[in-house]
Image (cartoon, helix red, strand yellow):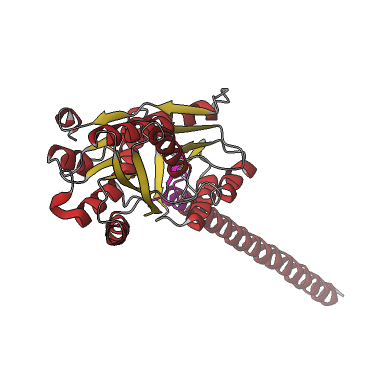
Amino acid sequence: MKARGNVRGNVRGNAWRSARGKVWGNARRNARGNVLRSARRTARIKVSLVAGLAATVALGLAGCDRGGNTDLGLALSTMNNPFFVGIKEGAQAEADARGLHINITDAQNDPTQQINQMETFTSQNVKAAIINPVDSDAAVPAVGVANRAKVPVISIDRGVNGGKVGSTIASDNVAGGRLAAKTLAESLGGKGKVAFLEGQPGTSAARERGKGFEEGIKKYPGIQVVARQPADFDRTKGMDVMSNMLQAHRDIAGVFAANDEMALGASKALGARSGKDVKVVGFDGTPDGVKAVRNKTLTATVAQQPKLLGKQAVDWALKAARGEKLPQSVKVPVVLVTAENAAKFDD
């Protein structure tokens, strides 16, 4: 009996120890598993956080590369012209003085580029955009991009024939055209045959300067305009157009070119006659134009103030961004440059 009891006790004891061992073993294994799984989850979370932070930093840097901190955008028609380089310099100086970042682009006289540039400006969340249209009609879609994004638009030097533009800042081109007509006519003693090199068709500047010149020259019945043709504000084209005009009209005594680049091209075509036998009046007052006036190969140039235009464009763009009421147009005065006062305009 006692032996059987001992056997039963041993069996029960062994069974209890075995069961208890299994329970503790399972518990330890479960605990170990939970710890490992928790560690793995923690590691995954840390990796995700690091990846997220890296992505955020990357996006931030990419935003800076795109000009994420850009305050203003200025879309110029071209920078292959000293006048527009002057506008750029004036705008950049004013932006720098105000602690602003301005993105200045060059459309290279391609209207479609200005649409793309306006899209870039709106993606940069600029406060306002400034456009110097390649073409007053073709600039309407570019302005529309900014209008849809609720970005205020200011135009400079040339107007836009559509869309919502807060204000147009430009030289008084009509008055400048009249002044050019008066200067040319008086330099010829009120009589003679003249040629007119027109600017780029479709631009408000070309249209307004032409209007002023026509109005002014009518006051001199002894002056006859025998040839007129666009040369697109370009020096090389100005030379070519003038050369062609001279073949048909060898007795031309005077030339009005709607910008200095065309005037300088015409001067080259005229050779030694330029400024002497043939009076040449330009428009813009660029450094090369003023130098030619000093050298008397150009008779005069109607000087704009491109740096002042650029400065005022930034000022008015900021006013537009603040929601201030703006005048439809802002006219910047022009000044006549002759050999007598050209030294004052040296840049």
77 falls in the magenta region: yes
Which quadrant is the N terminus positioned in? bottom right
Depth check, front residue: 130 or 329: 329
156 falls in the magenta region: no
**Left or right: 298 with respect to 148?**
left
| Residue in the picture at 36% in, 35% down | 91
Residue 46 image point, x, y percent: 53, 55
Q: Residue furthest top?
A: 325
On the question of residue 335 being in view, the answer is: yes
Q: Residue furthest right?
A: 1
**Left or right: 77 with respect to 252?**
right
Residue 87 falls in which quadrant of the image? top left
Q: Is residue 150 above or below residue 319?
A: below
Residue 287 image point, x, y percent: 21, 40
| Residue in the picture at 55% in, 28% down | 328
Depth check, front residue: 190 or 198: 190
Depth check, front residue: 171 or 61: 171
Q: Is residue 179 above or below residue 135?
A: above
Residue 24 image point, x, y percent: 69, 64
Which quadrant is the C terminus positioned in? top left
Residue 90 image point, x, y percent: 32, 34
- Boundaries of the magenta span: 61-78
On the question of residue 56 being in view, the answer is: no
